[in-house]
Image (cartoon, rainbow, N blue to C red):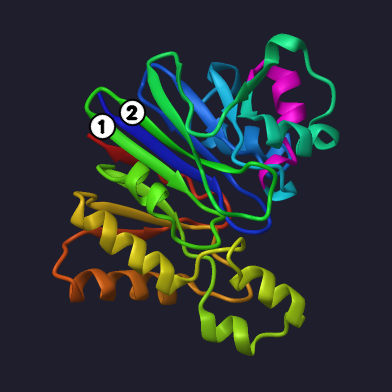
Amino acid sequence: MSIQLSPLFSGSSGNAVYLSDGTTSILIDGGVSAKRIVHALTKLGVAPDSLSAILVTHEHRDHTYGIGPLARAFSLPIYATRGTWCGMQNMVGDLKKEQRYALSPNQRFKIGTLNLCAVPIPHDANEPVCYTVFADNHKVSLATDMGHIEPGVVEALSGSNLVLLEANHDLKMLEEGSYPVYLKRRIAGANGHLSNDSAATVACMLAERGTKEFLLAHLSLENNEPKVAKAAVENALRASGFKACVAVAAREEDGRLFKVE
């Protein structure tokens, strides 16, 4: 059995990740229109009605925009923390009671053949989480939208075969860019987003704990470049003596499917 993962969309304009162990398939976030998500899944050869659930990390629009229409169209349940449910209610709209699953931070739960954990993260949202996913003897983690590195998060991600990890911005590009000061402070703040350097630090911590593959995600269009983010993480890993594969998630659908076997 393997875990397959495809970042359908990644970045401040929208995020959605498809994950499956071949038996149970889920969508994590849906920050673009339901129509675009359906199109991206179809390109992968995945029927939207074959999904078992939608998981949500937090209520921001670039993670929730399309989940309400998608859930209603295909009768899908949505899993999110109670805080996230409060924050995204207007965005999601009306759903049947049986489509609403409220999680607690650090809660372990099961969807089909997947075992999961909702891990609390530092971000300027209402009870945000990242997710770890276990299937057979494999572990995959998805961790974006974090303002800083917390030991509890690193511990939760430890032992993952593959980690989808935020590398949002290059600090110099952010500082010298055109964003207003308040937005620069928010992005670089304790509850904002991880920089390339912070992502590199996390990657080295996780590589020491056995992670061999990293997929960098949620890159800023204005304040980062794929080659810059990739080089920052690769160089840090190499300097620390770790061998790991580093890739970068595309902003728009490109049909790549990453496998953990």
Query: Residue at horizontal 48%, vertical 27%?
Result: 107
**Considering the image in quadrants, where does the C terminus appear?**
top left
Q: Which quarter of the picture shows residue 49?
A: top right
Residue 123 in picture, x, y percent from top left: 61, 54
Determine the residue located farthest toward the top in the rendered image: 98
How many marks on residues? 2
Q: Which quarter of the picture shows residue 183?
A: bottom right
Residue 33 in picture, x, y percent from top left: 74, 40
Residue identifier under label 2: 134
Q: Is residue 46 above or below residue 201?
A: above
Q: Which residues are magenta?
A: 63-77
Decide which of 172, 220 is in the foreground and name it. 172
Q: Is residue 113 visible?
A: yes
Determine the residue located farthest toward the front in the rendered image: 151
Tell me whether the residue at label 2 lies in contact with that at label 1, contact meaning CB atoms closer than 8 angstroms: yes
**Considering the image in quadrants, where does the N terminus appear?**
top left
User: 76 left or right of 50?
Assistant: right
Q: Amino acid at mark 2?
A: Phe
Main secondary-structure element of the magenta-colored stretch: helix
Residue identifier under label 1: 138
Determine the residue located farthest toward the bottom in the rendered image: 176
Q: Is residue 231 above or below residue 102?
A: below
Q: Amino acid at mark 1?
A: His
Q: Is residue 79 magenta?
A: no
Residue 79 in picture, x, y percent from top left: 61, 25
Q: Residues within 10 Å of mark 2 (few under 14, many from 20)?
A: some
User: 163 left or right of 193?
Assistant: left
Question: Rounded to the nearest whole Å, what is the CA distance between mark 2 and mark 1?
Answer: 6 Å
User: 97 left or right of 2?
Assistant: right
Q: Secondary structure at mark 1?
A: strand
